Image (spheres, rainbow, N blue to C red):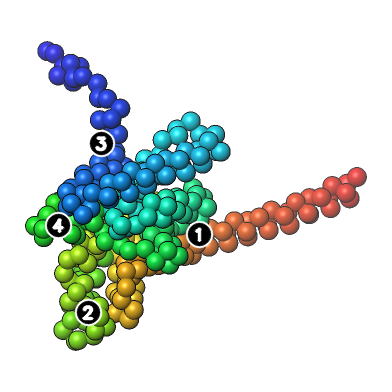
Amino acid sequence: MNNPQATRPPQSPLERFLKTPKGAVMAVLVGLTLVGALRPQDHLGLLNAAVAVATGLVIDGGVALLQRRRKLFSDGGVITALIVADVLSHMTPLYVVMATTAVALLSKHTLKVGRKPIFNPAAFGLLFALVVFGTGQSWWGSLALLPIWLTLLLLAAGLLITSRVNKFPQVIAFLGTYFALLLAMAFLHLGLPSDTPGDALRAPFVNSALYLAFFMLTDPPTSPAPYRQQILFGVIAASVGTMIFATSGGLAYLLIGLLVGNAWRLSLRWMTNVPARSASSLLGSATTVIDAKNDISDENLA
């Protein structure tokens, strides 16, 4: 009998790449960016996205050259650049888009433990731009400015990516905590008069939370893998973000919540490594004592 797999044509490099988690994320982000730009006012968003991607490729390509890596094309750099462009307002000056993307990617290469970054690069760069440049953030790539029914497209894309990176506990914990706290605040009439919980439960704020949960919170290098830690990570990011929204409002609350979650993950890694480091130190001390005794014995024998 003929083996059907023997006659199957080999997959192209593009097909193989799209089947990887990074390839799937990139394809989905490109799709959402193109759909978001259907709104006439957001056509300039495509220019921002192109400039951000070019900046990301230059930054990561330069780092690859310095490190003498063979692969110069950075899929991670493209993903970060697309997220930055999707969040920034389409009216953002191009130099700010470039600076935000550069800071985001440089944070990935400098603020790290081992080979993994500490903070989500896009969130770090966007918060930097908000503080330094006072940038507007429309989250247009989350389809926040398009008809509400297109949120279903965002949900479908987000669920696909969450499944590919195995982060369902984290996303469910984040969104469940976030919306539960906002509902409780609305019932208890808590929060600011200017930025009410009711506002956060409507578009475009809902789209922003979904986009962050699906495409930024789930970033594998900056989020935990064990399910229990994923749940805690999601609860912490949502709780901190909601608390900041309730007390200060503004645009940074989701980003700060995510970055605090990243910092918690770093502290968790440090605490779980303490016993191993302590055991290693004790073993090293014992070895030093033994070596010293052997040196004395050797001197006496001489």
Q: Which structural element holds mark 1?
A: helix
Q: CA distance from mark 1 to mark 4?
A: 47 Å
Q: Position of residue 173 (x, y in %)?
A: 25, 65
* Amino acid type for the residue under numbered disc 1: Asn
Q: Find disc 3 in the rendering and name its residue.
A: 19
Going from N to C along the chain, the mark reached first, 3 or 1, is 3
Kindly tell me whether residue 180 is visible in this rendering: no
User: Which disc number belongs to residue 165?
Assistant: none
Going from N to C along the chain, the mark reached first, 2 or 1, is 2
Q: CA distance from mark 4 to mark 3?
A: 29 Å
Q: Find disc 2 in the rendering and name its residue.
A: 196
Q: CA distance from mark 3 to mark 1?
A: 34 Å
- Marks 2,4: beta carbons within 8 A: no
Give residue 2's quadrant in the image. top left
Going from N to C along the chain, the mark reached first, 2 or 4, is 4
Going from N to C along the chain, the mark reached first, 1 or 4, is 4
Neighbour class for label 1 at 10 Å: few (<14), some, many (≥20)? few
> Which residue is nearer to you in this view: 143 or 152?
143
- Marks 3,1: beta carbons within 8 A: no
Neighbour class for label 2 at 10 Å: few (<14), some, many (≥20)? some
* Amino acid type for the residue under numbered disc 3: Lys
Going from N to C along the chain, the mark reached first, 3 or 2, is 3
| Residue at the image point whose x is 42% and y is 44% from the top | 55
Q: Position of residue 174 (x, y in %)?
A: 26, 65
Q: Which structural element holds mark 4?
A: loop
> On the rendered structure, is 285 left or right of 154?
right
* Numbered disc in front, either 3 or 2: 2
